[in-house]
Amino acid sequence: MEFLVVALGGAVGAMARYAISLIPVKSGFPFLTLVTNIMGALLIGFVVGIASGKNEVSENTILFWKTGVCGGFTTFSTFSLEAYNLFDDNQYTAGGVYVLLSCCSCILGVLCGKKLSALIR
């Protein structure tokens, strides 16, 4: 049953990721991946915060959202490839800014998600 829950969540996350990738943005900077990773970090922080609160949250619900949806939605492998490509194209400043913004913003996203979840616990 757990595998089915994760698979369904992964499908939802992957479809949401694909939908974001269809937003027409013309830039050499990978903004959509950055936004996706920040949103994913916010969501996973929220899910973890809700799960650790007083609310009764089933293990399947946590698996659906945390492992399934967030796993299918976030794009760390794409981030890694895009950062590599920026550095490989000698765009060291853009690559450094991208890595720094991605890491710092996503850690902040987890913190904000946990804080947001505390408001409804």
Image (spheres, rainbow, N blue to C red):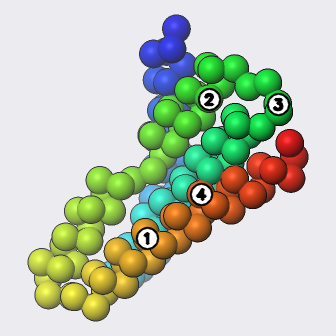
Q: Which numbered disc, 1 or 4, marks the residue that appears first in the sequence?
A: 1
Mark pair 3, 4: CA separation? 19 Å
Q: Amino acid at mark 3?
A: Asn
Q: Which numbered disc, 1 or 3, marks the residue that appears first in the sequence?
A: 3
Q: Quadrant of residue 53?
A: top right
Q: Which numbered disc, 3 or 4, marks the residue that appears first in the sequence?
A: 3
Q: Secondary structure at mark 3?
A: loop
> Residue 34: image x %, image y %?
45, 68
According to the picture, the residue beneath numbered tag 1 turns out to be 102
Mark pair 1, 3: CA separation? 31 Å
Along the viewing direction, whichever of 61 and 90 lies nearer the viewer: 61
Q: Secondary structure at mark 1?
A: helix
Q: Secondary structure at mark 4?
A: helix
Dot in front, 1 or 3 = 3
According to the picture, the residue beneath numbered tag 3 turns out to be 55
Disc tally is 4
Do the CB atoms of the residues marked 4 and 2 lie less than 8 Å apart?
no
According to the picture, the residue beneath numbered tag 2 turns out to be 62
User: Farthest residue in the right direction?
Assistant: 120
Q: Is residue 24 visible?
A: no
> Residue 71: image x %, image y %?
45, 40
